Amino acid sequence: MLKPDLLSVFLLSLLLLGCGGGSGGGGVSGNQITDSDPDVTDPVVEDDSSNNSSHGSVSDQPNILLIIADDQGIDASAQYAVSSDLPVTPTLNQLASNGIVFDNAWATPACTTTRSTMITGQYGINSGVLDVGDKLPADAVTLQQFLSSDENTDNYQSAVIGKWHLSGIPADANHPSSVGVDYFAGNLRGAISDYAEWDLTINGETSVSTQYHSSAITDLAIDWIDDQTQPWFMWLAYVAPHSPFHLPPAGLHTQTLAGTEADIAANPRAYYLAAIEAMDTEIGRLLGAMTEAELSNTIILYIGDNGTPGRVVDRSVYGSGSKGSLMEGGLRVPMVVSGAGVSRQNVRESALINSSDFFATIANLAGSGVTAVEDSQSFKGLLSNVDADQRDYVYSDFEGDSVSGWAIRDRQYKLITTLDGQQQLYDLVDDPLETSNLLDGSSNYSSIVEGLASVATMIRDTDRGGDGETVAIDITGEIFTQRSANCEDYIASYQSTAMDVFRSVLFSGNLTISASAGKCQLQSNGVPNHDFNDGQQSFPNNLSEQNYNYQVTTSPVFATSSTALAIGSDNGLMLNGVKVDLLAAACFAVGDEKTGCGDMSQPWRFDPMFPANGFRVDSHNAHVQPNGSYHYHGTPNAMFAADTAVESPLVGFAADGFPIFGSWFDDNGTVRKALPSYRIKSGTRQAVSGYATPIGDYDGTYRDDYEYIEDLGDLDECNGMQVNGVNGYFITDGYPYIMGCLKGQMDPSFN
């Protein structure tokens, strides 16, 4: 172990090394992949070489150390000032000083269920792991398997050391290896009866260890790391500070305790805190055993697996609930991230984090391009960028002896619903300790309850092997009719069937719309509700299901100035789940006119809707990008009656939240098509300083062949107007077809 004087030296060296990030090798960033568009014949075909995946050298990939504390809530964490009775944890304090403390991390109320969310990226309702005794399903895709299957991360070696608690009862000694763990050494069951005498299983072989548990698994971790020659991912799960409460070995803690059974019974929290201090000392010993180069290339993620147990919780903080409950005392856990790639240092982060998010984040840190898997969303961006995308809600579920139900929160409100129908609502901004159930008062919070419940319903009723049986609305071939501009009026799950006509391949589409905290969440696999690829030539690229997760505000407003469309940003999502991506990453005189047109000031960008350009759009004015995403460039003909003088419905939402309508509107009793205010310029193309100029007259080949003339038609420069007090974009037969720019603030989810 590290003695106090050596620990001080280690912490000083940790600070000098810049363990909080910056000095060491960070995670693989890879090439930025833009939503470029040029799946066409000459002159425009996209080179998708930026999508070729290959992991970098070992030095380009960080080692990833995930440390899980057992039963530690924020009332027992020195990184949170909610209690005056806290452990002394210099190692964790230093990691926090060199990194980020997350203030709103949610786990589940118990050990097994949280570990399942982390290793599968799924909520309990979707994994089937909802209680302490549940076994991780044999067909679950674990994080370790995911890393091994991705060619960007398949060079990582994985280890789980310490507590497993995912193999059910009785515990299966070979369970870790059966779900993809390269090396396992620790205790299989959830608790040990004695920290000084416990069953140690190493790769299926079990013996009795008489070494103090926290010290023993630290030794095992040090030994395993010393043997590694490739980048590694270690899942290090301490049993501490889980019961039995005990007196750790001298030198590992600062508490002055008698250690008798009577004293433990009378003062259990002091012994509980001592176990946390001993764990902190051993974490310091582990980090101190690493070489300078290895430490500088290691990112450290620390989290508690659930709240503090009721016997030792600080009741002055969490008097309403602790471990095993859906109150904050059961769900809110300490979380610190520090080390390689963490450039934000000594800061607190208020973003909402689900324990399930560790799956996508760790995969992302290792070099995978994934940012969302199952119910997991990567928070890697927050490690270096305060403005990175964040969740709008977190969710947790549990079915135990004391409580069965679920909880969901947005940035302000939290709703708890038990399976017997009881509900509680709390304002976590004004009442973070949940002292007042808002539903017990006289004020009406029905809209907040309904909004949160709608998101939870989408999570719980999506049929992915769970118990929910929601029947999605079939929109195959449907002409849309509703005109409401409020995205909340479309909350539902939708499904469809579509045929790739040229290839005779059948696809299933799905779209889910939910709402929370003033935004609608739009989740889609990108498959349309109509047949596609029915042109004279087949698409050069084949459609594949996508994983779109967009958000739009429920109350869009005009920004100070309009925002130009840009490569790398999607422009909107239609109500059939297909995105709008109007630009082409293809320009005159740029390379071979097939790729590399990321300069948005380039004046001669090809218009995909100009027939002679060779973009192989189908009858719906859409085609497929090299990454498999089907997207519209013009009128989506199957969504509204394009040739009939009937006031058109809403067919989608732009990235700024404003509605997208079909072509027809009621002009004082006359239903007619909206007319754009763009026209083709006259004469011969004029040179633009700094850019090569194509010869010939303006004819529509390039987007800059058009000019906006105010009041030439009905619509403004963004192809929008206000009808009956509602502003929206209108689909037009001519340029710019759907929208020319954005009038409001684009949501970052469309980047």
Image (cartoon, rainbow, N blue to C red):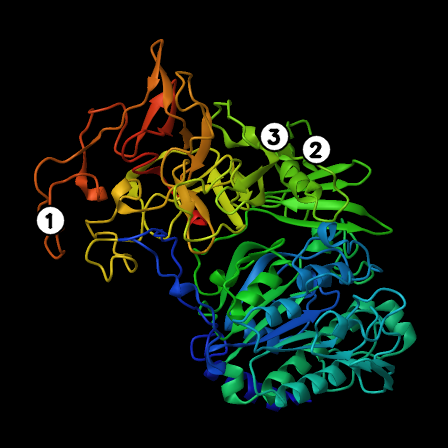
Disc 2: which residue: 439
Question: Which of the two labelled residues, at mark 1 and mark 3, occupies the earlier sequence position?
Answer: 3
**Identity of the residue drawn at 46% across and 77% down:** 56
- Label 1 and label 3: CA atoms lie apart by 59 Å
Marks 1, 3: nearer the viewer: 1
Disc 1: which residue: 695
**Identity of the residue drawn at 57% across and 61% down:** 102
Instruction: Relative to 313, say whether 422 is above or below.
Output: above
Residue 200 at x, y percent in the picture: 83, 81
The one of 680 and 412 positioned closer to us in this rendering: 680
- Mark 3 lies on a secondary structure that is helix
Residue 162 at x, y percent in the picture: 75, 76
Instruction: Relative to 428, say whether 676 is above or below.
Output: above
Marks 2, 3: nearer the viewer: 3
Side (left or right) of 300 relative to 41: right
Marks 1, 2: nearer the viewer: 1
Residue 184 at x, y percent in the picture: 74, 78
Q: Which amino acid type corresponds to the residue marked 3 in the rendered image? A: Ser
The one of 531 and 436 positioned closer to us in this rendering: 531
Residue 633 falls in image quadrant: top left
Q: Which amino acid type corresponds to the residue marked 2 in the rendered image? A: Leu
Side (left or right) of 502 relative to 247: left
Question: Which of the two labelled residues, at mark 1 and mark 2, occupies the earlier sequence position?
Answer: 2
Q: Which mark is residue 488?
A: none
